[in-house]
Amino acid sequence: MLFAIEEINNSTEILPGMSLGYYIYDTCGSIARSVKVALALTNDNNNVSSTSESLCVRSAQVRGIMGETSSSPSTAIATVIGPFNIPMISHFATCACLSDKTKYPSFLRTVPSDYFQSRALAHLVKYFGWNWVGAVRTNDDYGNNGMATFTETAEQLGICLEYSVSFFRTDPLDKIQKIIEIMKSSTSKVIIAFLSHMDMDVLIHELSNHNLTGYQWVGSESWISDSQIAAMDKNHILDGALGLSIPKAQVSGLREFMFDVKPLNSSNSELFTEFWEAMFNCKFKESKSDELPSKCTGNEDLTIVENSFTDMSLMPIFNNVYKGVYALAHSLHELLSCNTTCNNNVQLDPYMILQHIRKINFKTKEGDDIYFNENGDPAATYEIINWQPGESNIVNFVTVGLYDATLPAGKKLNLTNKSLIWAQNSLKVPESVCSETCPPGTRKVLQKGKPICCHDCVKCAEGEISNSTDSITCERCPLETWSNEERDACIKKEPVFLSYGEIMGALLTAASLFGTCLTSIVAVIFFRYRNTPLVKANNSELSFLLLFSLTLCFLCSLTFIGKTIVVLMAFKATLPGRNVMKWFGPTQQRLSVLTFTVIQVTICILWLTISPPFPFRNFKEMKDKIILECALGSPVGFWSVLGYIGLLAVLCFTLAFLARKLPDNFNEAKFITFSMLIFCAVWITFIPAYVSSPGKLSVAVEIFAILASTFGLLICIFFPKCYVMLLKPEKNTKKNLMGKGVSNSF
């Protein structure tokens, strides 16, 4: 501050011909003293020990206040001076609460609000995938408000706090011990430390006593770049710490000015004495005891001292003070209409000064843009600092990224490609999660009684998938698809149908071909012996038609009716007075077959015309497959066709049954009866089996019924005849066939 004031007073470009004066008050970080100082300033009274009766009686003459460093004293001062509109510009009070202009109308600052820092810290934690963290804060406006904003933002980003504890440097030691025990018993490996540098001093001392290493620390700007704290960390507890810092700055001439303490000694011997004794740990006045500190000579060399004052690590904060002084000077420059000289006749009013400060916009000699937003805050920009080991056990504060709150969302946080050092000098990013990330194919289920970051991973149900990590729900696959084994993708359902390639299809095909071959062989045999009595007696035309029908497996039952009636009527006609055979000659046999066939064809044509069968994909029967079916179209048509075939079979069976007592040598009705029994049994069994069989099994049942009934007919009717024609030719005579009373049969 003194450097900036001296630079302004010696300048001809700003406030020419005028000098700024100052008075320094030390609040010692006390809220009570801060209020007392504020009351004194509002009364233009340098005697801060004035009684309350003499206060608030004169108009304020002070033009502006630089400070305070901490947030809580700043809120106390700003509350008192607010009604008087005295501008107050802080260089390090970052509490977001101070942006509230209804409570603190005259407060401004050259350091960003913790509103932005807290959000930046939350986004930094999210960036590295930590969703289970602990937090410790200073128990004052700075820590409590900063942590409140961090917690709110963290919840929005899906970050959970396992614990959040607070303390103040004056708290009893046992309270800090309890906080350390909480840290030890926690499962989180990342600690957010929203602490002032003074509170961090106290905490790091106690942590060193417990050797609490292995935790990843994420710090606020108050301590993350403080070389004094780094020097205190002898046990390397904070190794690899990460945090936000005010951007590095450079004010030309400031370092030389600060090392030249003679002007300070001449202008403020009390301040010089306090500074010098603290710097060299000595006393100007001789101590009565022989113990340290030693006596100060005033000739000690500042350049040999290594601390946060001499190494200029606090230059960003110094720069904020510098900018604050210049902001006040620029507002006065405009109010006094300064050019080559200033108008001394202008009546300066604190409110006018405040309004001009809010509107100022200028560049410092280093090129920094200085302005305030509507809340009295500057633009929020932070450097991301990483503690990395240097030579001689000295910590290097390495800038590894930037956070610029003025940029659009998604572009605010920008980390460079520099390698980061983590806790215990590890090169691997530490993990700090309550539960592991749920992989694709699973969904998160919250653990009862725990924060939302603690969950179990449950595999998606069949037919559902999740194709992203940490999915809350599983999505159902579209109708034509099904979930894969991993439940992370929907795949097309496999169509199911009876094919030649599978075992069942191959067996049924083989049986069909075998039956066709047998029928063909029988047909060849019948053709070879077509002129023999056995073939002629059984009506060769109907026999060949029956064989053809068996081959086609369609009209197999139709031919049995005419044949069975012929057999029955042939023997009934031998009875005296009977002349019915004329009604069952070859012509009548052909007409009967034709009539029954026309009825069958008519039913089929009506079915296929009105509501024909159609291809149908069945999604309900099997979850993971599509059953390709032939839908009936009209159930009435289907059952009409099947019922008509059944009716013909029953009629054929009835006629054969009536002819069962005919002479054995010509009793083909017995074979027809037995074959019809097989036919009816198969198809009666087919109905419930067909209805209850799903998918391709229903097709297999239908094929099996056709094959079984066809084989039954083929074997029962034609095999005995083939046996006689091939193996017993002596029985293939008209005499043997027409003989009555003969007991042998085939």
Image: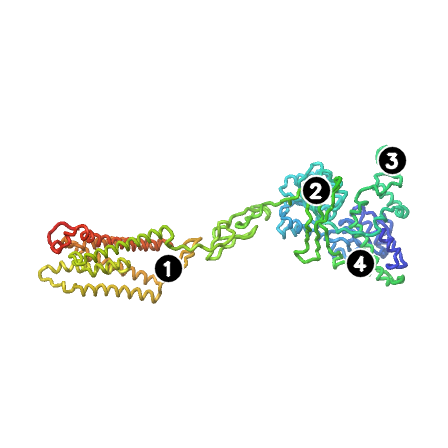
User: CA–CA distance between discs 1 and 3?
Assistant: 111 Å
Identify the colour scheme used: rainbow
Q: Is 227 on the left-hand or right-hand side of 493?
A: right
> Mark 2 = which residue?
239
User: CA–CA distance between discs 2 and 1?
Assistant: 74 Å
Looking at the rendered image, the disc whose residue lies closer to the viewer, 4 or 3, is 4
State which quadrant residue 176 falls in.
Answer: top right
User: CA–CA distance between discs 3 and 2?
Assistant: 40 Å
Looking at the rendered image, the disc whose residue lies closer to the viewer, 3 or 2, is 2
> Mark 1 = which residue?
630
Nearer to the camera, 287 or 405: 405
Looking at the image, which residue is at 64% across and 48% down? Answer: 128
Task: Give amino acid for label 1.
Answer: Cys
The earlier-in-sequence mark between 4 and 3 is: 3
Q: Is 106 on the left-hand or right-hand side of 745?
A: right
Q: Is 509 on the left-hand or right-hand side of 314?
A: left
The earlier-in-sequence mark between 4 and 1 is: 4
Q: How packed is label 4: few (under 14 Cα within 10 Å), some, or many (20 or more)?
A: few
Nearer to the camera, 112 or 179: 112
The earlier-in-sequence mark between 4 and 2 is: 2
Mark drawn on residue 78:
none
Residue 326: horizontal and vertical position, in percent? 82, 56
> Mark 4 = which residue?
363
Mark drawn on residue 287:
3
Q: How packed is label 1: few (under 14 Cα within 10 Å), some, or many (20 or more)?
A: some
